[in-house]
Image: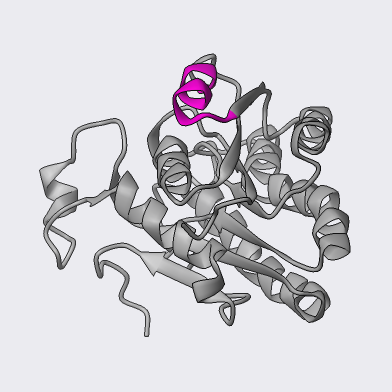
Amino acid sequence: MNGKGKVAIVTAASKGIGAGIARELAREGYSLVLFSRSEDVEALAQELGGIAVRGSVTDAKDLDRLVATTMERHGRIDALVNNTGHPPKGDILAITDDEWFQGMEMVFLNVVRMARLVTPIMEKAGGGSIVNISTYMAFQPSLTYPVSSCLRAGLAAYIKLYTDQYGPVGIRMNNVLPGFIHARLPPNPANAATVPLRRYGTTSELGQTVAFLLSEAAAYVAGQNITVDGGVSRGL
């Protein structure tokens, strides 16, 4: 198992995509620290033999506590998966400043803050891997999700700069860009019809991609935006 003896943090891990990723990493042998506001994360952590930390990805103090708890329990952090919920959406001109700032904290600053916390730990250990869960709309913007589209395009740039700085010390950061994933709500047939594979992806399929990127099999993959969308993206 690729993750045997290694420690991974997964945020927003109580359900949906985060829980699916956690299950795949558990199968790979990682010791897990799962983070979420929901009490459901405690049951999942117990099921997977990991530990749970309650808190929000938008609260810097909660993120500090997450990393501190991981180090107290395990003394190392080999892998980090920055997953989060959905930022505000609506008409592009009707979205308030507060909602834009809320989105910034949820989908961009969470990555920046966690990178500040875990990079010195990974650098001291001689390397590590970080995967951020983004969206295919980072490169194919949608008026339905303007906040997510704009800020995750910024995240695509961030990982390039991070890789320039920390690739030389063995830390890899990549983004995974999901399309329609069957997480909690039933698949929408109209959306599925737009996908060349004519179906939604599963959280397990997404989790397997994340597990690959965290593994030594992806040791030469860094600073990349990996789309997992069944072919729905039209960019070349």
Does residue 137 appear in the picture of this structure?
Answer: no
Q: Residue at x 31, y 54 (%)?
A: 205
Q: Residue 228 at x, y = what percent? A: 35, 63
Q: Which residue is drawn at 18% across and 40% down?
A: 187
Q: Is residue 80 above or below residue 100?
A: below
Quadrant housing residue 136: bottom left
In magenta segment, residue 43: yes
Q: What stretch is highlighted in magenta?
A: 41-50
Q: Which of 126 and 55 is in front in this view?
A: 126
Q: Magenta-highlighted stretch: main secondary structure?
A: helix
Q: Residue 44 at x, y = what percent? A: 46, 24
Residue farthest to the bottom, as pictured: 236
In magenta segment, residue 208: no
Q: Residue 160 at x, y = what percent? A: 68, 75
Q: Residue 201 at x, y = what percent? A: 25, 52
Whether residue 194 sits left or right of residue 33 in the image: it is: left
Q: Residue at x 68, y 23 (%)?
A: 55
Does residue 118 appear in the picture of this structure?
Answer: yes
Quadrant housing residue 178: bottom left
Q: Is residue 150 above or below residue 58?
A: below
Q: In this view, does 52 lie above or below 30?
A: above
Q: How many labels does the image show?
A: 0
Q: Which residue is drawn at 83% across and 32% down?
A: 72
Whether residue 209 sits left or right of residue 75 in the image: it is: left
